[in-house]
Image: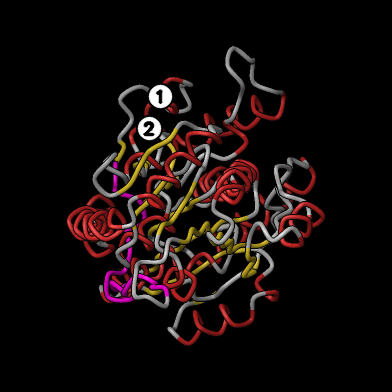
């Protein structure tokens, strides 16, 4: 029996799907992975192959809608899937879900599943603004692809509701709702909060994200500027990397923030735990998520959270219990929430404990994966 995973970014597999693939392999399945640009990620490639997984490179542009390039993607997906002959296919992110699902149906795969892990810029429109031509194209492609699935897996109820509202899948189509991708509670253990020289809790903030506007990076920086006017010694940390996405932050913007001393930039980290250990409050001002994995990792390590009252993000925080929820793009409210911790540092201790409790009860990766295995009939 063969299980095939299709994704658009090879490095995401170990962190986001590693435990799921481990559980499927333990059931005796031969694991195959389709992803683009595999030669650019040698360390991830070697790690996965050492686990006995079979990696197949496919041509796929992560961003953009070039019809010729996407047609080539679909063709190669079809021929590769037909050669592998998998019993199960699971795809996640936009292009793998659309073209992977269509190719799997063409190749007559018996069991096809799609996982909606978050809706990016393709689903963002201003109030009362009609979808763009690109968005309409993406919606139409979803409508063609999704009915070929056995079930569609969603990571938050808002994404599920939006797909139904946009009629991207038939009415009463089988869906599954899971608590994000879960988090490895053994790998992300509680670690002591940072302390100053007097032994007091040190208030410092951290954001981990691809450097995209819709991750709330600009709002994070603007709130940091406000805080630093009154509390110049408060530290703001940023972990992430540049992206080819249309909403990406520019290198010039990043350089300017660093040179002004607004933020300490760590770059891209293979292991984010050292950066989480340096912070006492984790901040994600994102416009929309599936269920944000970095928030779950911070919660698992006993950190309090500030995030937005947005789909996916709001699933992680009980406002006033393990952190605070603020409106999307609301810089002042974000800064106000940050200041609460500066004025009452003991909050980070109690709320950090609450974060760990919530993540253990709701977001344990083993519990999430068990639900997925059952729903996929594995």
Which secondary structure class fits the magenta region best? loop
- Left or right of 228, for residue 91: left
Decide: is 352 above or below 108. below
Q: Which residue is situated farthest in the bottom direction here?
A: 50
Q: Where is 272 relative to 355, above or below?
A: below
Between the C-alphas of marks 1 and 2, the distance is 6 Å
Q: Position of residue 169 (x, y in %)?
A: 43, 28
- Give the quarter of the image for residue 18: bottom left
Question: Cβ–Cβ below 8 Å for labels 1 and 2?
Answer: yes
| Secondary element type, mark 2 | helix
Q: How dense is the environment of label 2, judged by Cα within 10 Å: few (below 14), some, or many (20 and up)?
A: some
Where is residue 139, by image quadrant?
A: top right
Q: Residue at x 43, y 35 (%)?
A: 326
Q: Tell me, for residue 376, which label it has, or none.
A: none
Q: Secondary structure at mark 1?
A: helix
**Magenta segment:** 177-196
Residue at image point 19% right, 58% down: 357
Please say whether residue 278 is one of the residues in the magenta stretch: no
Front in this rendered view, residue 363 or 39: 363
Mark identifier at residue 160: 2
* Residue 182 is one of the magenta-drawn residues: yes
Residue 213 position, x and y percent, is: 65, 43
Residue of label 1: 164
Camera-side residue of 373 and 273: 273
């Amino acid at each position: 029996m063969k299980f095939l995973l299709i994704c658009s970014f090879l490095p995401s597999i170990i962190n986001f799907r590693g435990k799921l693939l481990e559980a499927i392999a333990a059931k005796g399945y031969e694991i195959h992975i389709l992803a683009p640009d595999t030669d650019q990620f040698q360390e991830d490639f070697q790690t996965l192959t050492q686990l006995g997984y079979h990696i197949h490179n496919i041509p796929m542009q992560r961003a953009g809608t070039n019809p010729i390039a996407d047609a080539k993607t679909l063709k190669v997906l079809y021929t590769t899937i037909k050669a592998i002959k998998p019993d199960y296919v699971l795809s996640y992110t936009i292009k793998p879900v659309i073209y992977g699902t269509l190719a799997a149906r063409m190749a007559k795969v018996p069991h096809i599943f799609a996982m909606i892990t978050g809706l990016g810029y393709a689903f963002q429109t201003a109030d009362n603004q009609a979808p763009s031509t690109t968005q309409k194209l993406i919606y139409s492609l979803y409508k063609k692809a999704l009915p070929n699935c056995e079930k569609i897996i969603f990571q938050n109820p808002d994404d599920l509701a939006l797909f139904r509202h946009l009629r991207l899948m038939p009415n009463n189509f089988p869906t599954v709702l899971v608590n994000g991708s879960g988090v490895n509670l053994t790998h992300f253990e509680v670690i002591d909060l940072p302390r100053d020289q007097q032994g007091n809790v040190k208030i410092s903030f951290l954001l981990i994200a691809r450097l995209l506007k819709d991750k709330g990076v600009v709002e994070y920086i603007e709130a940091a500027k406000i805080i630093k006017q009154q509390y110049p010694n408060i530290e703001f940390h940023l972990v992430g990397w540049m992206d080819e996405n249309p909403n990406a932050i520019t290198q010039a913007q990043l350089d300017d923030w660093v040179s002004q001393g607004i933020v300490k930039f760590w770059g891209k980290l293979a292991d984010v735990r050292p950066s989480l250990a340096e912070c006492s409050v984790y901040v994600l001002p994102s416009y929309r998520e599936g269920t944000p994995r970095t928030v779950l990792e911070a919660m698992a390590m006993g950190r309090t959270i500030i995030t937005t009252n947005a789909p996916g993000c709001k699933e992680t925080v009980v406002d006033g219990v393990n952190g605070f929820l603020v409106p999307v793009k609301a810089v002042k409210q974000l800064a106000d929430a940050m200041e609460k911790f500066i004025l009452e540092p003991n909050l980070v201790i109690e709320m950090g404990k609450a974060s760990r409790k919530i993540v253990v009860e709701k977001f344990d990766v083993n519990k999430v994966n068990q639900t997925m295995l059952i729903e996929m009939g594995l």
